Image (cartoon, rainbow, N blue to C red):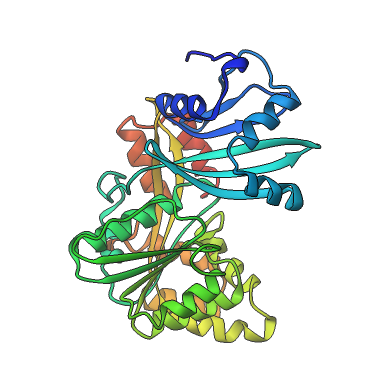
Amino acid sequence: MVKGENSMLNKEQLLDHAKTCGATDIHICAGSPVIFRVAGELIPITKESLTAEQSRQVSLELLTEGQKAQFESKLDYDLMLADKGGRYRINVGYFNGEVGATIRILPTEPKTIKELSLPDIVSVLAHRTKGLVLITGSTSQGKTTTMAAMIDEINTTSKKHIITIEDPIEYVHANKTGIVRQREVGRDTQTFYSGLRAALRQDPNVIAIGEMRDYETIKIALTAAETGVLVLSTLHVISIDKILERLFSYAPVADEGQLRFLLAEALQGIIHQELLPTVDGGRRVACEVLVVTSAAKNIIRRRGGFFLRSVIETGKKQGMVTMQDSVNDLLEKKIISEGVAKSVLANYT
């Protein structure tokens, strides 16, 4: 990888070079080289570390004068940037007293379920007419990419009205067979909750929520799912075992019973994924999929989430997939290494 000179840094050169290198993220930090994340790895790009002044200059070049004033007031600033070359999600902030930035390079259009090599059951879940489908995983595991692929599947094949509520909008969907109306938190609606409440009055067939972040959003999403709308959303959780624990952590103790009932009635499926480095330097999703059966409903109503794993392990006829099967399939096809497979499966035994 060619390393540039610090003196040559400017916004356009930085973004162009990152895209040429296939980077997903750019890190600008005082006392460190400019760093690209390529295929999941952090790669230094400049020969020397940035000075505090260089880091500040490059970071603030991403902002308008008005945005700079807001940044100095709030000490953090998030924005979306779009140009003819692409779209970028940017955070500028103070780190140990010095200004730095993180830039996420966003894909220009969603990938399909087939392009992501997701199991067929993901497409089946996308075509449910009502209920809640969750895409789960830890940070940066491709949850938003999978949700965008499911939206694209619906948009391509069905005459449906899809409303998304996102923070920020990462994939832009063009209207195909269906209609997709995208709303960005902070620009088009104040919060996920307010956007979701409004969406219920906008004649939706499908509502996609970028992330479930609070109890009110979860409760109204479940209500919408129960009354005839398909709701897609993501949730940060390390495994399906922990899904109930995570959802109930948002609710007052007195409301856990009601939340269990709503979840058991509305939940259609969970797609839990890990984004793994491949032997050719790329990345591939491994996932486990739960389809909510009567047995799963009973577990949600009465028991702990760790019992859901037995439902997945015995649910192959319903299209369910275990993480072990998904990872072993990638290993057998020589897409991932044995070391990667072992490190992932160590968390699923």
From the viewer's perspective, is residue 134 above or below residue 325?
Answer: below
**Viewer-proximal residue among 239 and 283:** 283
**Viewer-proximal residue among 240 and 163:** 163
From the viewer's perspective, is residue 347 above or below residue 4?
Answer: below
Q: Residue at x 42, y 47 (%)?
A: 324
Give percent across and percent down for residue 327. Answer: 40, 42
From the viewer's perspective, is residue 39 above or below residue 51?
Answer: below
Give percent across and percent down for residue 250. Answer: 64, 72
**Viewer-proximal residue among 269 and 345:** 269
Give percent across and percent down for residue 165. Answer: 45, 66
Q: Say whether residue 228 is left or right of residue 158.
A: right
Is residue 187 in view?
yes
Give percent across and percent down for residue 191. Answer: 56, 69
The mark total stands at 0
Is residue 265 in view?
no
Q: Residue at x 36, y 47 (%)?
A: 325
- The residue most toward the front is 65
Q: Residue at x 75, y 27 (%)?
A: 52
